[in-house]
Image (cartoon, rainbow, N blue to C red):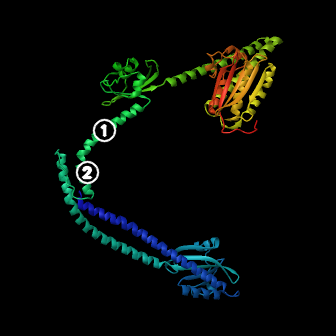
Amino acid sequence: MRLGVRGKLFLVSVIVIFAVALPSGVYLEITLRNWLESRIEDDLVRFAKVVGDALQRLPADADGAAVDDLADALGHSMGAQVTVLTDQGQVVGDSTRGLSPSDFARESLDREELVGARNDGYGIAIRYSPELGAQMEYVAIPAQAAGRNLLIRVAMPLSEVDQLARKLRFSILAAGALGLVLAIFMSGLSSQLIYRTVRHLIEKTQAIATGEKGLRVNVVSSDELGGLAGSINALAEALEMQVAELALERDRFIAVLNGMSEGVIALNENKRITVVNQAAMRLLGLTVSPVGKTLLEAVRIPALAELFEHQAADEAQSVEFDSTGRAPRRIMAQISARRAGVDSVVVLHDVSELRRLETIRRDFVANVSHELRTPVGIIAGSAESLQEGAIEHPTAAQKFVEAIARNAKRLDQLIADLLDLSRIEAGRQRIEPQVMPVAPAVRKAAEAIERKAADKRQKIVVRCDENLIAQADPKALDQILFNYLDNAVKYTPEGGRIQVSAELLGDRVRIEVADNGPGIPPKHQPRVFERFYRVDPGRSRDLGGTGLGLAIVKNLAEAMEGQVGVAPVEPHGSSFWLILPGAASKLGGVA
């Protein structure tokens, strides 16, 4: 059965009344009961303390009869049950038992209120008393009297709480019945008033739905029905606004497309371009919008046209090609799966940098394989020669053993450098720049390489301001300086000169290691910091280089927000430099 407006209003009114009255009644009853029980508990605590004070005033030789008389008197005056027990559970006084103290039974100490009094100094419990036939609230506290440890328990019936709860329930039911009667009356009155307005709205809305133009609903009130009438009147105007908003949304869509770094091309079922963004035109080298043309008409890239021809219905497909123009790029085109009635979308990604990095990775793997294969081959060949009889010839055996040791050391250094480089590039090596003096680090590196330089009769000169400080990681700076100096000693001829200097350039610190060795040709200088790059591969291997030292230097410097580079020294030689962030001040006298 369908309910009309009147029926719905009546039903809602009844539901609201019950939804409000029932929880409110339950809440009020619980709140009132809790308040009354709390008040009774406070009274019982006060009564128990009064009993305790009275017991303390008894003479030291008072017997059980005196205690029982006191319990009877106080219980009668308070209107409560007063029980006095020893700490062993023996009842020595009770205001409700018509027995002499000698006839009192032992009370169980497991009762909740007695356990609380003994353990916590205060106990409370609510339970039904078979003796009194009523729900009782008990409060117990410990006390001392006549040289004995006692427990005082005071109890009162909760009948008053039950009576008030019953009265409250009756009041709530009466109020609910009255509210129900009022709901019937008010729903009938309000529904009659609303029905006429609703009927008018229905008639006018149906007329508008048939296509009548210029028809408006008269706003008859300022309430929700009046708002509904205004909404209906605004419907025609809203249609025009929606058309304008659709145009705005299209403009926003085009703005988002043109703001993307990826190229986007949409094609309809006739294979003609409907949408193209600026990134796609840039990647494809287009200067005129290709909208309305086919892909093959717009760009002479067979791979792209073929991608659309072989478009699958179940999954996206992709193809890579090189764009044309003055700056060719490697482009990956991905086309969406074919769906009936929906334009196909081609997304163009510039993967030039990604492919370049992949090439670098492949070259790196190949170089690592080559660099590892050389010392391993020498070690294997030398060992094989020793096995075949060279060990019987001391001179030849010594030569092969030295080759094994030398290449094993080189292999160990190569692996160590590879691990260092991998750790640095992966960000697993902690680089923590801090304010530090430069001069001690420079002297430390020079002293570490001094013996190696002395073997070649080389002179190391240090020129560094003792007060110069920089933002650097101490361990990383030590590794960079040692690598620079080690290379300088390796490639500088005997009797050569190596100079280490440091200076402040604006807010940066420049550290330089210069030598008068053979130098580095200009065509090699931009690549010396690449992995495994050698100016003279044969000579570098003979000197024990792994080809990774300068790559490690570059990564460490960049991790400290620094820069590295190389410059020629006239008339011959090389200068490797490091630029680090300076500090805001200088350390006075620190070296």
Seen at 19% across and 59% down, the residue is 196
Q: Nearer the viewer, residue 33 or 453?
A: 453
Describe residue 3's horizontal placement relative to residue 464 as left or right: left
Q: Compared with residue 536, is residue 101 higher up or lower down, i.e. above or below? A: below
Q: Is residue 504 left or right of residue 177?
A: right
Image disc number at residue 108: none
Q: Nearer the viewer, residue 248 or 313?
A: 248
Q: In the rendered structure, which amino acid carries the disc numbered 1?
A: Leu
The crowding category of the residue bearing disc 2, from other C-alpha atoms within 10 Å (few below 14, some 14 to 19, many at least 20), is few
**For the residue marked with disc 2, what is the amino acid?**
Ser
- Given the current orientation, which residue lies at the most extreme front position? 506
Residue of label 1: 246
Residue 487 can be seen in this image: no
The residue pinned by badge 2 equals 231
Q: Residue at x 38, y 34 (%)?
A: 255
- Residue reaching furthest to the right: 394
Quarter holding the C terminus is: top right
